[in-house]
Amino acid sequence: MTATHVRALLAVAVVLVLGAVNWSIYAKERIKTQGDRVYLELAPVDPRSLMQGDYMALRFSLANEITATESGTAPLFVDERGVATVNRSPKAGDLRIRYRLRNGQVWLGTNAYFFEEGKAERYAGARYGEFRVDRGTGEAVLVALADENLKPK
């Protein structure tokens, strides 16, 4: 294989990687703007990471409601406020949320919310994570934290 072939293959690989990254970003942005809004009750775990700046480690109550042995989707019941719980009587067409198993625990898209250094007090009263959920795939994107009245923090 000549140096020209190697450069061409490298260029194709770079284009493919950049294309995949950009597609992933586009998909997340589409969910953020067009996804169904739901709120998941949360429980902060650990408010600080010296290596990554300030963040709030998150665990969602909904994850405790899902019993699973492999990754999948769970049907949601969304109340009049927009707060979601697992729907124990699912029907076709119900909104579903994708989850993954990580170290034997249900993981719902993220386990941390990052914010500017010195802003931890602002988020200390957060009680819900505001998600946008893609109705087709169940993919969820955390877009904000909210207080007990579902007001953004």
Image (tube, helix red, strand yellow):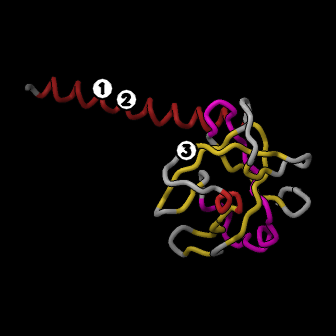
Can you tell which quarter of the image residue 134 is in? top right
Q: Residue at x 65, y 74 (%)?
A: 47
Can you tell which quarter of the image residue 9 is in? top left
Q: Residue furthest left?
A: 1
Q: CA distance from mark 2 to mark 1?
A: 6 Å
The residue to which callout 2 is attached is: 16
Q: What amino acid type is highlighted by mark number 2? A: Leu
Name the element at disc 1. Answer: helix
Instruction: Looking at the image, tell me whether mark 3 or mark 1 is earlier in sequence order.
Output: 1
What mark, if any, has residue 12 been given in the picture? 1
What mark, if any, has residue 72 been given in the picture? 3
Figure quadrant of the C terminus: bottom right
Q: Is residue 20 above or below residue 82?
A: above
Name the element at disc 3. Answer: strand
Can you tell which quarter of the image residue 1 is in? top left
Q: Mark 1 and mark 2 in contact (Cβ < 8 Å)?
A: yes
Q: Is residue 62 above or below residue 8?
A: below
Q: Residue at x 73, y 72 (%)?
A: 120
- Image spot of residue 148 (x, y percent): 88, 63
Q: CA distance from mark 3 to mark 1?
A: 33 Å
Q: Give, as a single range, the part of the protein colored magenta.
A: 111-138
- Image spot of residue 24 (x, y percent): 52, 36
